[in-house]
Amino acid sequence: MSLKKCLLSVVFLVAGGLAQAHSYEAGAIHIDHPWSRAMPPTAPAAAAYFVLQNTGAEADRLLGASTPVAGKAELHEHAHVDGLMKMHHVPVVDIGPGEQVDFVPGGYHVMLFELSRQMQAGERFPLTLRFEKAGEVTVEVAVQADAPQSAPAQHGMMHHAH
């Protein structure tokens, strides 16, 4: 194999590895593929999504989140209220033993307010998740042009303004 072919193989292997979902561990909590959708520069907020799995025998709960790219990060949920889809702040998100909680458009998500700027597709930013038992873990959120194809089924894509 020529040096050129060898180098090209390495480049494709590395690029393929970077494109794959990334995951993190915090105690018994497994965090899979944190991502955010690229937003227009004038959008007042953004959202972060991921999947939480509790592989332990005890319940845990997500207490909050923070990131240096936003002045404020809040846990939110979309819910049907009086026949309308509404978004509201939730103080905590419970994760029972053996359970999975999907943070997806139209469901749970982390709202990011007071952004220093909107992140563009291809960028990444740190997001620290704070759990009651598992403690804190900082994940890298991949900014994507659209939802990843490997994301869990999305429940009613809704756009919302704050």
Image (cartoon, grey):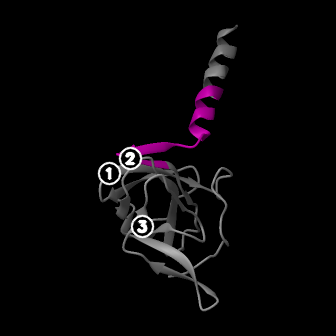
Residue farthest front in this picture: 57
Callout 1 amino acid: Ala
Query: For the magenta stretch, what is the residue range?
Result: 12-31
Where residue 96 appears, x then y in whole percent?
43, 59
| Image quarter of residue 84 | bottom right
Could you tell me if the residues under marks 3 and 1 are in contact, i.e. CB atoms within 8 Å? no
Callout 2 amino acid: Ala
The correct choice, above or below, for 116 with respect to 32 in the image is: below
Q: Quadrant of the N terminus?
A: top right
In the picture of the structure, the residue carrying the numbered disc 2 is 28
Where residue 98 appears, x then y in whole percent?
48, 52
Residue farthest top in this picture: 1
In the picture of the structure, the residue carrying the numbered disc 3 is 93
- Mark positioned earlier in the residue sequence (3 or 1): 3
Secondary-structure class at tag 1: loop
- Mark positioned earlier in the residue sequence (2 or 3): 2
Going 61% across and 33% down the picture, which residue do you hit?
A: 15
Indicate which disc residue 134 carries. 1
Residue 113 showing in the rendered view: no
